[in-house]
Image: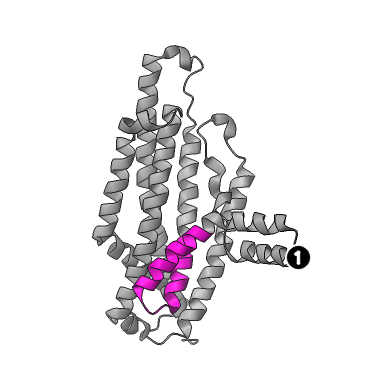
Amino acid sequence: MSAVPFSLRRTGLIAGNTLREAARQKLFLFLLALALALVLGARWFRDFNFGAPELKFLFDCGQGALAFFGAALTVAATAQLFFSEIENRTALTLLAKPVWRAEFIAGKWLGLAALAAIFCALLTALLLAVLWVREGQLMAEHPESFAAGRVVSYGLVALAGLMQWLKLAVLAAFTLLVASFAQTQLFTVVTGFFLLVIFHLQYLAQETYAKSGAVLGKVIGSAIAGMFPNFQLFTLADSINPADLPSAASVVIVGAYAAGYIVVAGALAVFSFRHREI
């Protein structure tokens, strides 16, 4: 394949086909419907928010639905779409043509990232609408509490959706890395969720090793921090208070952090896939 240059067009065609196949899956529609229902139904669960302000509760409920169902969709879709190509021998047919394996991996990731972007955009748009309507109702019912106008930062809500997408894009890259050498779809799905837990909790292990004072513990903590992304860094928009809006530099840094792990995981996936018998 060295005589044929890398083609963004071929990569884009693979990405488009991946997105179409993913959108046709019943899993995508099922999880999207569940997430939309949870966001819409959050208003009727506000009595169980244990004293949290209603608008913040609606925001947290929407973000929880986005994170949970988005992760389930990303891991399951990545494993299913990758192994369907292997099992149906379509990957063998495709790679027999002048197509790089790097193009195949990159196209798969781009398609999955686009799927996650659509999912995040739909839920974030619905969450914005729910918050806007409910805040308007509260302003009419309790005008004294909104003397200064609306209290929700809708820019923060949109930013929170972007941060969720970045996390799903990173998760898709690492799940694709596992799929590149795994032998079964089940192993890929289980490992993908295991990685998700590590990404969310690795900072705890790092802090524990650091507090232990042992040199070995600090080395292990540093290794964990370097190997796995820390999803706690993506909580830049964990509030709806306009005063908590982060700086543009912080957003760029987190975006670069996510892009770095995506590139590394993707490169490792390409390397692994090149040595895999199809």
Name the residue located 46 percent from the left edge and 12 percent from the top edge: 144
Q: Circle 1 — which element?
A: helix
Task: Determine whether, in the image, residue 257 is placed left or right of residue 193.
Answer: right
Estimate the x, y position of residue 236 in percent, counting from the top left.
Answer: 56, 43
Along the horizontal axis of the image, is 251 left or right of 138?
right
Query: Is 188 covered by the magenta stretch?
Result: yes
Residue 106 in sight in this render? no
Image quarter of residue 109:
bottom left
Q: Which residue matches tag 1?
A: 215
Up/down of 252 relative to 139, above or below: below
Extent of the magenta region: 170-198
Task: Find residue 259 and report its image quarter.
Answer: bottom right
Q: Main secondary structure of the magenta part?
A: helix
The scheme the figure's colours follow is: one colour
Give the amino acid type for the residue marked by disc 1 in the picture: Val
User: Does residue 192 show up magenta in the picture?
Assistant: yes
Instruction: Locate residue 102, reporting x and y percent.
Output: 47, 76
Report x, y in % for residue 262.
53, 64
Q: Residues within 10 Å of mark 1 (few under 14, many from 20)?
A: few
Q: Quadrant of the C terminus?
A: bottom left
Q: Residue at x 47, y 17 (%)?
A: 146
Q: In the image shown, does 210 or 110 lie closer to the viewer?
A: 210
Q: Quadrant of residue 40?
A: top left
Residue found 47% across the figure and 72% down from its top: 177
Total marks shown come to 1
Identify the residue at image location x=66%, y=54%: 207
Seen in the picture, residue 108 relative to 134 is either above or below; the reply is: below
Percent from the top left, x then y, of residue 141?
A: 37, 15
> For this rendering, which residue is in front, 186 or 132?
186
State whether residue 119 appears in this view: yes
